Amino acid sequence: MFKKVLIANRGEIALRIIRACKELKIATVAIHSEADATTLYVKKADESCLVGPGPLSGYLNIYKIIDLAKQRGVDAIHPGYGFLAENPEFAKACEENDITFIGPSSDAVHKLGNKIVSRQIMTKAGIPIVPGALEKINSEDEATAEANRLGYPVMLKAAAGGGGRGLRICRNEDELRRFLPIAKKESLSAFGDEDVYLEKCLESPRHIEFQIVADNHGNVIHLGERDCSIQRRHQKLVEIAPSLLLDEKLRQEMGAAAVAAAKAANYNNVGTVEFLIDKNKNFYFLEMNTRIQVEHTVTEEVTGIDIVREMIRIARGERLFIKQDDVKIRGYAIECRINAEDPKNNFIPTTGRVTAYYSPGGIGVRIDGNVYVGYTIPTYYDSMLAKLTVRGRTWEEAVDRMYRCLDEYVIRGVKTTIPFYKRIMLDENFKKGEFNTNYIDQKIEELVYQDERDPKDLVLAISAAIVAHSGL
């Protein structure tokens, strides 16, 4: 049994982990930068400690975090997502210091963190992968030869990372030669590794991922799929469970492939197997994420299974409490990432102080966030403020509920993506389930909205008009 867990993260995911630990009667230690000292997750933890004065370096300092964990007498560390969550050196450091890493083994993190190695593992296991190279690209001539074999367009991708960094779509040889050094440089900057590989670019695919849960006793199941096709620059914006695209036959085939992928990698704990589906409904392994996902909420809502709680249970050696046949999908869930961004200005991140905050509520509504009145949004971190998740008995009910909640949601002081999501919920293609990874690019002009005026601005305008009219 764990008595104390350190959360090596910040923001809403740190708060999410703290809540799961409290339900399991486990004490928590939050780490924070000076910029995060007064935030909500720090206040909710049983203990907190400064990990470093810098806004970023502390969250990335493996040995500082390990030292703090030993000083505070913790049994385990939960990495959340981002920062060190998929760093095999961090997982290894925990193992070497007799601290349980709440996640997969360092060996699994290492193997699956390299996209080339993971593609090799899946190929050996007979799992379909996106057509492309199984080795890194060493030269322009090697790249052009592979591209000619695959046929354009092709994608240059970073072997050591994801999230769109180090990725370039090449539609001809000139672009391939021009983008190769750029992709390698970007990959080196982002991941400390310049290796890139080449794969076929699937035009307008659907992005479907399966949630995997695997204990340390050889039991592996999946919790169904999520449709993450609505993206911008390879960053997910809206997540849905289950997918409207999959019929039961395809769902079973992809679920079986996801479980086989986890077994092939000798995987334990929670993970996500990501696939692309082409226009003919052929599916291909894309990658496996060795951490909790931002969008885990939609899976929890349709299955009733607390995924973070399961991560902790598995890490302390317990067996899965359910079998595959026990997993039942009920209704539909949608998650919108509420970001501090201006969609009308190329989604540029916005900062400032939150002057008003009113969250929606009611049946089937969930908020995961770290925002409150007076919160000052820092410039150093991801722009996500909160995750709004709703569930409905039917797809139509879920969409209507999400629109109602977005209409209720008030965050003043900074621009957010709330009005943009409202337009998506009204879009006929979205309501019909007709979308792919190019949806935002294709629909951007149709999703234009009018800025919503702050009621305070309206009061001031009326007051000014009264003063002007009365001649005061």
Image (cartoon, grey):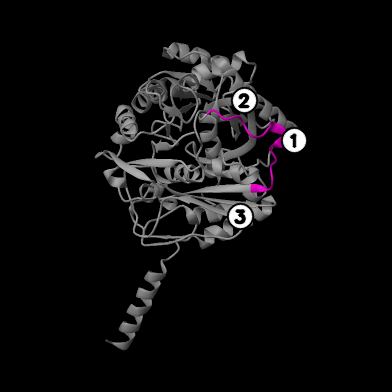
**Residue 437 position within the rendered picture, expressed as x and y whole percent measured from the top left:** 56, 38
Q: Quadrant of residue 187?
A: top left
Q: Quadrant of residue 229?
A: top right
**Residue 2 position within the rendered picture, expressed as x and y whole percent measured from the top left:** 46, 34
Which numbered tag is attached to residue 248? 1
Spot the residue most to the right. Answer: 249
Q: Which residue is mark 2?
A: 284
Please indicate, yes or no, whether residue 5 appears anywhere in the rendered image: yes
* The magenta stretch spans residue 321: yes
* Mark found first going from the N terminus, 3 or 1: 1
Three-letter residue code for mark 2: Tyr
Q: Which residue is mark 3?
A: 364
| Picture quarter with the C terminus | bottom left
Pair 3/1: label in front = 3
**Residue 383 position within the rendered picture, expressed as x and y whole percent measured from the top left:** 40, 46
Pair 1/2: label in front = 1
Q: Secondary structure at mark 2?
A: strand
**How far apart in space, not on screen, are marks 3 and 1 (Cα)?**
25 Å
Q: Nearer the viewer, residue 11 or 92?
A: 92
Pair 3/2: label in front = 3
